[in-house]
Image: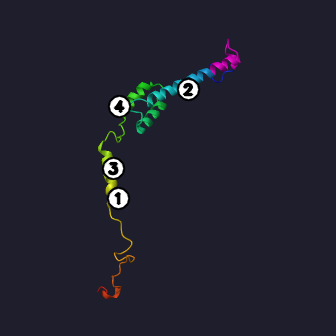
Amino acid sequence: MTDTQAAGDVPGLSGTELEAALTAAKAEGERAALARINGVIRTAGIKGDAARTAAAIDLLARAPAMSGADVADWIVRCIPATPTADAVPDYVVRRASMHVVARSHPVASTTDSDDRPATNEPRDGNAGDVPPPSR
């Protein structure tokens, strides 16, 4: 039966029986599709890896005839894993040391040592003591 056939065109089924059968078939198809998707994205090597998960969903949509196991196998073999802090043990140490280095730089003072506002002027206030540059 095609979607364009009338409900009365199917021999042996009334309109309500046909609608019930179509509803049940659609629900079963949706469950199967979700099981296929969940089976792939929960596979070890894909779960938790954003790049591999995105590639798996894309492949699932583009290759509906491919089984979920084949999709998962292809993704794990062909898409490189995204490194995590667990996969690179010294990553956390390097990040922490960069944070310490960034915090250890001195901050410019807003006052001079004698609690006056910092300026570029000489301390005695005689800016005119320095002769202008000669040309």
Q: What amino acid is at disc 2?
A: Glu
Task: Identify the amino acid type marked 4.
Answer: Arg
Nearer the observer: mark 3 or 1; the answer is 1
Q: What distance separates the C-alpha of mark 2 from that of mark 4?
A: 28 Å
**Above or below, comparing residue 59 to residue 23 in the picture:** below
Residue carrying label 1? 103
Q: Which residue is found at the position 37% from the left and 35% from the top?
A: 79
Circle 2 or circle 3, nearest the eye: 3
Query: Could you give the CA–CA distance between mark 4 and mark 3, rounded to whole angstroms?
Result: 30 Å
| Residue topped by disc 2 | 30
* Residue 31: image location, x then y, percent: 54, 25
Q: What is the magenta range?
A: 7-22
Q: CA distance from mark 2 to mark 3?
A: 45 Å
**Colouring scheme applied when the structure was drawn:** rainbow
Return the disc, 2 or 4, that comes first in the chain's sequence. Answer: 2
Name the residue beneath numbered marker 4.
Answer: 77
Characterize the local packing of mark 4: few (<14), some (14-19) or many (20 or more) Cα atoms within 10 angstroms.
few
Which of the two discs, 2 and 3, labels the residue nearer the N terminus? 2
Q: Nearer the viewer, mark 1 or mark 4?
A: 1
Q: Which mark is residue 72?
A: none
